């Protein structure tokens, strides 16, 4: 479903409409993508999107239906066995202890699988994960992804409800043509919808991990988001803004 980002030395400046329509389900977020890829668009439509005037769901709860939807076609029971090695770092139930090792609990299976394929192909670089991903074949991949997706969704402890981070997350900054995170990552970062698994859950993820990824996107060390969307989003973020966004998101 995803384009291989290696084929696209990703342009950071807008240069017209990319051919992304076929990759995306029809929905608000897809429109956001389209808007972002058009070099000139009306400030009003931007403001609407930036302020989250979209039909947004909470990305699915921990009901059996939502869990089934986000787990995809793999078998979570098989996946539990096959992911022993992974559990050593990511936690038995996908809740890692190390702050730079991401939680996988309740993450969309197809996002997990997409990231693993990116590590395999080298379009996302991390010494440990490039080696780990190389140990998985396609069939195991679906089962392992389903196992972590089927856990109750990751959750923060709510202690740090950073107001500045929350405002940026919910409203973006229309004066700087910045889109609000909520448009794609959903309310409290819990994902947009189980049927839109390309937008990962970030609410309740470790703060240090979120900060690291935002810096990696901003500084170009991570370039595997579709159409370099996260590189554009992060490109104008200051260290302080990243800190506040990471604090707000991780607490949810
Ligand atoms: C030795 C520790 C370790 C082991 C074992 C390990 N991982 Fe990881 N994993 C990490 C670290 C560290 C990262 C963050 C890498 C980065 O910053 O790109 C990560 C990142 C990931 C991500 C990206 C998550 C996201 O939110 O984007 C996925 C998916 C993942 N690992 C799955 C697995 C699977 C499946 C296995 C088993 C085959 C596994 N990992 C084994 C340490 C580990
Ligand atoms: C237009 C849609 C869109 C918007 C707006 C957006 N994101 Fe993202 N974000 C994505 C997509 C798509 C990915 C998945 C990238 C990939 O496929 O590897 C992502 C990935 C991420 C990740 C990495 C997650 C992980 O587990 O590794 C973080 C952190 C993140 N976004 C934070 C933010 C923050 C903070 C904002 C607001 C400042 C934001 N995003 C706004 C679409 C968006």
Image: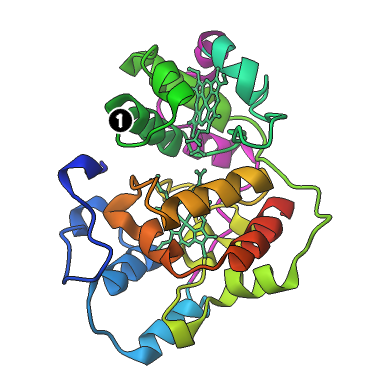
| Residue drawn 67% across the image and 64% down it | 244
Residue 92 at x, y percent in the picture: 67, 19
Residue segment shown in magenta: 55-82
Position of residue 59 in the picture relative to residue 16 (left or right): right
Q: Is residue 246 visible?
A: yes
| Residue drawn 35% across the image and 15% down it | 139
Residue extending farthest right: 159
Residue 50 at x, y percent in the picture: 48, 78
Observer-nearest of 6 and 144: 6
41 in relation to 216, above or below: below
Q: Is residue 205 visible?
A: no
Observer-nearest of 194 and 218: 218
Position of residue 203 in the picture relative to residue 233 (left or right): right
Residue matched to label 1:
122
Residue 64 at x, y percent in the picture: 61, 35
Q: Quadrant of the N terminus?
A: top left
Q: Badge 1: few (under 14), some or many (20 or more) residues near its Cα, within 10 Å?
A: some
Asked if the stretch drawn in magenta spans residue 60, the answer is yes
108 in relation to 191, above or below: above
User: Residue 45 is drawn in which quadrant?
Assistant: bottom left
User: Residue 163 is drawn in which quadrant?
Assistant: bottom right
Position of residue 2 in the picture relative to residue 183 (left or right): left
């Amino acid at each position: 479903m995803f384009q291989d980002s290696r084929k696209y030395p990703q342009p950071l400046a807008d240069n017209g409409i990319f051919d992304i329509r076929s990759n995306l389900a029809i929905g608000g977020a897809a429109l956001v993508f389209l808007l972002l890829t058009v070099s000139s668009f009306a400030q009003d439509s931007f403001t609407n999107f930036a302020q989250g005037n979209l039909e947004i769901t909470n990305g699915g709860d921990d009901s059996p239906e939502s869990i089934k939807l986000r787990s995809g076609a793999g078998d979570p029971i098989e996946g539990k066995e096959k992911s022993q090695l992974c559990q050593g770092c990511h936690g038995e139930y996908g809740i890692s202890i190390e702050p730079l090792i991401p939680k996988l609990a309740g993450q969309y299976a197809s996002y997990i699988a997409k990231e693993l394929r990116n590590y395999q192909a080298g379009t996302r670089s991390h010494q440990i994960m490039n080696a780990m991903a190389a140990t998985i074949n396609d069939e195991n991949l679906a089962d392992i992804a389903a196992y972590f997706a089927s856990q109750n969704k990751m959750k923060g402890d709510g202690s740090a409800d950073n107001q500045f981070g929350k405002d940026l997350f919910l409203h973006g900054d229309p004066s700087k043509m910045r889109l609000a995170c909520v448009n794609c990552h959903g309310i409290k970062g819990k994902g947009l919808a189980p049927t839109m698994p390309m937008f990962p859950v970030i609410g309740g993820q470790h703060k240090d991990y979120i900060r690291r990824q935002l810096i990696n996107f901003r500084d170009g060390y991570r370039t595997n988001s579709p159409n370099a969307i996260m590189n554009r989003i992060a490109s104008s973020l200051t260290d302080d803004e990243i800190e506040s966004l990471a604090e707000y998101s991780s607490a949810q």
